[in-house]
Image (cartoon, rainbow, N blue to C red):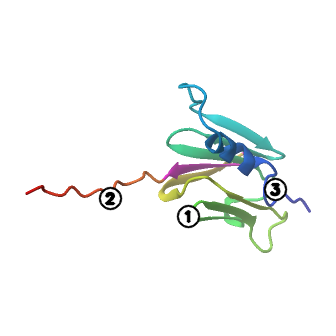
Amino acid sequence: MFFTPVTPAGFRRHLYASSARPSASFAQPVSSTRSQGTATIEQDEQSFTLSFDVPGVSREQLVVGIEGNVVRLSSADGAPRTYHFACELPQDIDASQSAAKLENGVLTLKLAKVVPVSRVTELVIH
């Protein structure tokens, strides 16, 4: 049996650390990469890309759930191997624009970030 970490230690600290401190320069990194055991997490301005090593299971035996900014990966009952992974991302995910691909035992999730919508209403001055 093989288990991946339920919450990658330090991942949340890594993503939130840059937003918690004031910016010292104008140049901000466009993307960042974090590897935790068998999971790799990359981020750019439009999306998150998560890659997992999940050898021994087919796409029908994997379940990916997205709820707001939480991503969960697990293997279905009866799968020859058991996988569990969950992480909280710093921004909500647009599930309709996201995609998952399993190729050669590597599951790649391309998760689109929700584009913030401005709710500003202009008032007419009389």
Q: Is residue 77 above or below residue 48?
A: below
For disc 1, the marked residue is 68
Name the residue nearer the viewer: 12 or 86: 12
Name the residue nearer the viewer: 41 or 75: 41
- Find numbered disc 3 in the image and state the secondary structure of the residue it sits on: loop
Q: Position of residue 54 (x, y in %)?
A: 78, 53
Name the residue nearer the viewer: 11 or 109: 11
- Find numbered disc 1 in the image and state the secondary structure of the residue it sits on: loop
CB atoms at circles 1 and 2 under 8 Å apart? no
Q: Which mark is residue 56?
A: 3
Residue at 67% across, 45% down: 15
Is 109 colored magenta in this rendering?
Answer: yes
Mark positioned earlier in the residue sequence (1 or 2): 1
Q: Position of residue 104 (x, y in %)?
A: 73, 45
Q: CA distance from mark 1 to mark 2?
A: 19 Å
Mark positioned earlier in the residue sequence (3 or 2): 3
